[in-house]
Amino acid sequence: MRLAFAVAFVSAIVPISMLGQAPASADTADKAYTSQNWPDAEQQYSELTKQQPENARYWYRLGVSARGDKHFDAALQAMQKAKALGAGRGLPAFLADYEIATTYAAMGDSAHALETLKSSANAGFMMLSRLQNDAEWNSLRTNDQFLALAKQVQHNAAPCEDAEFKQFDFWLGDWDVASAADGVHRGNSHISKEMGGCVVWENWTSAGSPYFGKSYNTWNPNLKRWEQYWVDTSAGVMFFHGELRTTSWITGPTTCRRLAAERCCVICSSSISAQTRCANSLKAQPTAGKHGTPSMTSSTRESPLNQLRLRRRTSREAQRLCRP
């Protein structure tokens, strides 16, 4: 009699649907979330947010689960809560904004979806695979604004894939360097791209001497110019900067007077005659590349730009040639 009364009492205060269910736990919720069982995940994280209302991660996962369960208003509310709680606590605002934008896209609200996606991209969202694969964006994939934002997200993910970072690609490879005047071998240079394409790394070794040096070259997107930092075994340190204009590298004439031993200037000066003297006096011959083919074609090798970047001379000769 007492047992029957207890069962009746519990039934009166607990919804029938919850009888027999285990209480919400982080492990149970995680299993439902990772298996994309959105109804169960939404229910679990709804309970967890009540237990720990300051947990940004629980609110974030509740938002994703609610969207997956097509409860869009609940998803937006949960993700806004996650964004507010996550500030400075490991949940970037741009990630919450992306989820909010995706929810708007799922609702068919293109204006809010693109507006919030723009905020996310401007703040640094870089998960290109999400943007490419999340089905909620399918109806907007040919939209011009979406395409522009996708390009920005791609830039965030791999900034050194931009066209400016490829301007020195002609220099990559292994090079034998000789004097045009007498054909004498002056040294070898190995040029490679490092750090995800962000740095062109020069490794110069002189022939017949222990002298060698390295330079680190990169495009500075803030100043819109190339910059090179050179160091060598004679304690030489130099900093160059310049830009590409048509087929000539332009730097100031002062730079060309600051040359370490066995190194020709990035470009002699803004003087065309000085550039011509430097280019005509030096010659480089590429060795076989990594796959047994020449690193550059002969037509590329003979361009004035390549001659300026790849020639090496002694300090005195280079200074004489490079002085405007």
Image (cartoon, rainbow, N blue to C red):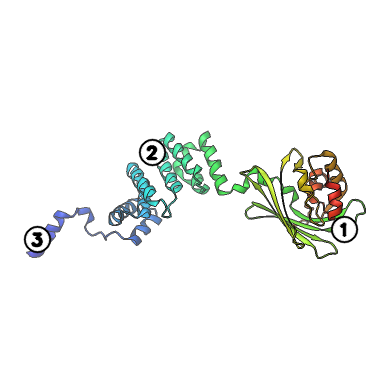
Confirm whether residue 68 shows in the render.
no
In primary-sequence order, the first of circles 2 and 3 is: 3
The residue at which mark 1 appears reads as 185
Residue drawn 36% across and 43% down?
Answer: 76
Local crowd at mark 1 within 10 Å, few (<14), some, or many (≥20)?
some
Q: Nearer the viewer, residue 177 or 130?
A: 177
Furthest residue toward left = 1
Q: Nearer the viewer, residue 261 or 292?
A: 261
Q: Nearer the viewer, residue 218 or 223?
A: 223
The residue at which mark 2 appears reads as 107
Circles 3 and 1 in contact, beta carbons < 8 Å: no
What residue type is disc 3 on? Phe
Q: Nearer the viewer, residue 221 or 253?
A: 253
Confirm whether residue 268 shows in the render.
yes
Q: Position of residue 13 (x, y in %)?
A: 15, 54
The residue at which mark 3 appears reads as 5
Q: Secondary structure at mark 3?
A: helix
- The alpha-carbon separation of the residues under discs 2 and 1 comes to 68 Å
